[in-house]
Amino acid sequence: MPKPILKTENLTFSYPTEGGQPKVVLNGLDLEVEEGSFVAVLGHNGSGKSTLAKHMNAILLPAGGKVYVGGMDTSDEALLLDIRRTVGMVFQNPDNQIVANVVEEDCAFGPENLGVAPGEIRQLVDEALESVGMYHLREHAPHLLSGGQKQRIAIAGVLAMKPRCVVLDEPTAMLDPTGRKEVMETVKKLNAESGVTVVLITHHMDEAAQAQRVVVMADGKIVADGAPKEVFQRVEELKTVGLTVPETVELLYELRKEGLDLPLDALSVDECAQALSQLLT
């Protein structure tokens, strides 16, 4: 068995509150993420998913339990640089992550800070921009780009540091449908072609459905974990923790309630159409 690239053991974390009991956000969480996999972490606001993301490259440290990144204990300060080289973070708002006035300079910022030789930086930047389909805009000003393009630049800036894993914390939350599609295609390509481990934190069901594995969080715990086709069949259970299911599954679920013999694992529009077509014929 390959070693997991990310592992949490009985992870607990609380935020202080004004004049009261600390608010428990992660509550004894155990999770392993295999190297090279694409995992979506789903949950409503306040479920703990973004707090978990911040533990994955030691932005936050456990109050209890352990987090390991490539076998390294995140609470060991001496390993911090190696941990952040292993796991790159992409956040909701690309404007908070873009630091330069020219796309390629922004992309070079991370490798420069890691002390990479100038000759090598050029190659890393070109490769990273190519991989997100933004090489043709390398000399442009980031603030003139669309939201989806900016987010792809932010992803390229992380990729230029050659991480083994990228954690994306709701990267499409501020984007229009076109921008969301661009970012999701970039993320899937990155995983499939470069073998980079992807952890996607999201509340969009259709995005989670594109991952190999879906982890559902509620109240700081994992309440479901499996392949999307398996997890999204648990419609009632997901609704009790404040989540919906993809529209295709919702349609099949409602028709099943009316007594029609339909599967709940037809996630894509094509699969759903095929299931309905078979029923009608």
Image (cartoon, rainbow, N blue to C red):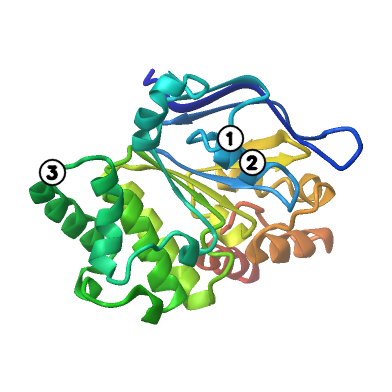
Q: Secondary structure at mark 3?
A: loop
Return the residue at label 1: 60
Position of residue 118 measured from the top left corner of the image (x, y, whole percent):
12, 49
Q: Marks 3 and 1, Cα distance to the nearest angstrom?
A: 30 Å
Categorize mark 2 by other alpha carbons within 10 Å: few (<14), some (14-19), many (20+): some
Return the residue at label 3: 117
Q: Please tell me which of labels 3 and 1 falls first in the chain.
A: 1
Categorize mark 3 by other alpha carbons within 10 Å: few (<14), some (14-19), many (20+): few
Position of residue 141 measured from the top left corner of the image (x, y, whole percent):
31, 77
- Left or right, 11 with respect to 57, comes to right
Return the residue at label 2: 51
Q: Please tell me which of labels 1 and 2 falls first in the chain.
A: 2
Which labelled disc corresponds to residue 273? none
Position of residue 244 measured from the top left corner of the image (x, y, whole percent):
73, 58
Residue 280 in the image: above or below residue 231:
below
What amino acid is labelled 2 in the image?
A: Thr
